[in-house]
Image (spheres, coloured by chain):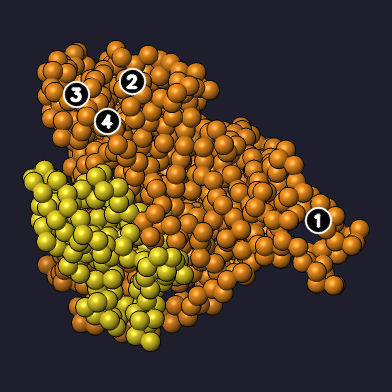
Chain colours: A yellow, B orange
Amino acid sequence: MKISFVLNGKKRTADVQPDMRVVDLLREHLHLTGTKEGCGSGECGACTILVDGESRLSCLMLAAQLEGKRITTIEGLSKGKRLHPVQEAFVESGAVQCGFCTPGMVMTAVDMLSRNPDPSRDEIREGISGNLCRCTGYQKIVDAIEAAAKDKSR
Amino acid sequence: MKREKQIPFRIGEATPRCDARTKVTGQERYAADYYGDHFFWAGVKRAGIPHGKLIKVHTEDAKKLKGVVAVLTSEDVPGSNRVGIIRGDQPVLADKKICYAGDPLALVIAENKETLQAALALITFDHEPLPGVFDVEEALRKDAPLVHEDSPGGNLLRLVSVETGKGASAFDECDVIVEGVFETPFQEHAYLETEAGWAYLDDSGQLVVVTATQTPFRDRNEMAPALGIDVEKIRVIVPYLGGAFGGKDGITIQCLLGLSALHTGGVPVKMWWGREESFLASVKRLSARMRYRLGVKRDGTFHALECRAYFDTGAYAGLGETVMTLGLEHAGSAYRIPNVSIKGSCVYTNNAVGGPFRGFGVTQVTAAMERIVDMAAQKLSVDPLAIRRVNAVERGDKNCIGVTLTHSTGIKKCLAALSDHPLWREREGWKMKAGQFKKRGVGIACMAHAMGYPAVVPDFANAKIEFTGEGRFRIYAGIVDMGQGNASTYAHIAGALLGQEASAFELIQPDTERTLPSGSSSASRTTYVYGNALVISVEDLKKKILDKALRLFSTAQAEELMLVPGGIRHRKDKKKVSLKEVAGLFDESERFYTAYFRSPAATEMLDRIYLGPHIIFSYGAHLAYVEIDTLTGCIEVTGYLAVTDAGNVINPQAYEQQIQGGIAQGIGFALSEDYKAANGHADTNSLATYIIPTAMDVPDMLSVAADNAEETGPFGMKGIGEISISGPVPAIANAVADACGIRIGRNPITAENIFRALWEQNDQERPR
Ligand code: FES
Ligand code: FES
């Protein structure tokens, strides 16, 4: 079946199987491998993307559900060489280690900050609790999101 | 806070990692990210039963399925079909026996993922079930079923014993003796990137394997005989890993993937284990049972230690016996104990496969030793910090296996810093403020962790750096960066020496064709050993650059020139030339600089312990604040302090990353992680049943670096990668005991366990 959607600001159409997952469409067919898969069953958050501005797990969505939607993946977040403030904060705060959770974590943070621009550390922790990271112990991720929030509110 | 551009790397300055930008934008290409226009998928049929004689694997139906390229069994493996770095006891594809539920029986190559799954479901096998063995001590009984009939020691893979002083007879001279049995479960690494890779035969017939491994050169040596290929005909390329923590230290998918690529007529093949398969078939931290006895003099000095440990290596040897041995070498943690009797048995069972995990055996024994130390302190009515300060080793002392500590030994500094810290000084006040139905406790623990390989295994690295035609620097990192950031630290080191900033560097990740053999990414060794080699090569290169640059200046003295970002400047007249200009003076043949470094190793007492002792150790002293809800047993770690002696700090940001990450994994191990393989079946095979910490389960952690240079380290550093993971289990267990007087000998310490222990405690206190 044919679907059309807006992907990272560009109109796209794709011919998809009814049972194709969004994460496979992105990674395998559109070669956008920034979106990661860590579990395939909704437990790790590595596959998080934004659908109409809200965070969604792309391993639990079928491609067909993208019809008419606006999708942002990690590749679409920075403007040319300029990083999104959340990305910038992740780099500067040391929130990236192996980096496999990072794209999903960043997308979740972007969504969270759009709804709550000035979160407390506890709210940040709660907001990212659906995204697992095995490397960082989360502290520098929380630091980064806190810094990004400050950066934005300035 | 953005770093200003053009600031050269400085030692000791917190600096964002070089790999952060490509990772945060999704540009970094991991092994899992390889796809192509035309490629196949490969996957594995696994046994699903813990023990049996394999009679026949039926592949006919799978082979008939449209879209299936090949279905392979052990008969299709051209080589020895065996891997295992020490024992070579693990089949690539099972031939005679099934030794655990994850054993691979057949390999399917298909045109797409869907066909692959369908084909795997069509494979069946005939087997004769065998009784399994799932407990380490039962496995050592005479009548226990054998996991490997041809193993010389039966189910006992290796026995290691160490006696010093008067051994156990010294308990007669002790005033106080405490004892306990402690257990730690299998721990899953749960790296976010499950095992993945991409392989193909190139035009010259070379097998190219792109994969997530900690050990590219060693893998090649293992793959060659197993698959019957010449080692030179295998190229292993290793991008940045999406986490590993020891779980990718050795063969995971390499042979299966390589074998697949031999059957696709040159088409690339991809293998990527799902999470469930990763749980089933990846190695685990060896579970351990440890019986401890500590004898103490009235003044608090430790006098005798007995440790009887059983480590479960599961179905295959892997590195299990070295994991246990390193544990036993640390059985006495960071203390002086003149008389010890240590005995450890590393045992085969039909559980999972044991293997390296950050901490490598030390995490297990430290969980036991640091609790028994607290029990001794309690019995003597002394402060747990005081008893540790009395017994902590200093340089020149002997460690628990009797080896003299000749390198930096900073545990006393760590304890001093801990005792000065507000979290320690203000603990009583904090505990008193516990709310209704809450109990608060504070626990501490010390730890040591050896760096590098044991004495008889040469621990070396070969650094390689290129001065490019553009006047930039390309570092060929021969040691994998599994996420810990060692590659970035190589740029930091070179940048500090060459006066350059991050953009001057390009980091080449391990590739058996381009980078030089430098050993595994493990053993807290990567920055120390490669960094030392790199310093030598960079100094050589720097000298050459300055010498050549003289031609562009009106001076004959290289000392009058200095490297500045992007160029070279005369110290006095400030004239500057760009590095690109200098690079133009280099011949192609002059651009590469290599250097070899071999880590110092013990030269005495090599027979004291299997593979010989270590001589350089990092140290740590941790403190945990916990709060327990007495109605539910729920436990929360509300504060955490880690004081660490890992030498000087090159990049405080990267250093903290290691400390915090290790503590978080340790907290998971302490409170929730428990890989259950009851009767050999993987019961916790998802991230919903095997619980690793979320952001809600880990507190903000404080890290203090005890300033203690290791003279042999690059810029005075030593290994930081593992030390912090061994603290949380005992520190938290001690805090639980402090809060409510209960000692739970097995982690994870769950709410259920606490609740039950509190219930029993109340039961005993209730008047009858
Ligand atoms: S891959 Fe989607 S939640 Fe883990
Ligand atoms: S940085 Fe490795 S999983 Fe988060």
Please give the residue where the numbered disc 4 appears in the rendered image: B40
Please give the residue where the numbered disc 3 appears in the rendered image: B68
Dot 1 amino acid type: Ala
Horizontal side of residue B63 vs B512, given as left or right? left
Horizontal side of residue B228 vs B268, given as left or right? right
Task: Say yes or no: labels 2 and 3 on the same chain.
Answer: yes
Q: CA distance from mark 4 to mark 1?
A: 52 Å
The residue depicted at 60 percent of the width and 48 percent of the height is: B475
Dot 2 amino acid type: Gly
Mark 1 Cα shell of 10 Å, populated few (<14), some (14-19), many (≥20): many
Please give the residue where the numbered disc 2 appears in the rendered image: B265
Mark 3 Cα shell of 10 Å, populated few (<14), some (14-19), many (≥20): many
Q: Secondary structure at mark 2?
A: loop
Which corner quadrant of the image does residue A123 belong to? bottom left
Chain letter of mark 4 equals B
Location of residue B132 with respect to B480 vertically, above or below? above
Q: Can you give x and y, in whole percent of width and height, for residue B309 in the image?
A: 40, 40
Dot 4 amino acid type: Phe
User: Are the residues flagged by discs 2 and 4 in contact, CB closer than 8 Å?
Assistant: no
Mark 2 CB lies closer than 8 A to ligand 1: no
Comes first in the chain, label 2 or label 1 = 2
Chain letter of mark 2 equals B
Comes first in the chain, label 2 or label 3 = 3
Dot 3 amino acid type: Val
Location of residue B673 with respect to A140 vertically, above or below? above
Q: CA distance from mark 1 to mark 3?
A: 61 Å
Chain letter of mark 1 equals B
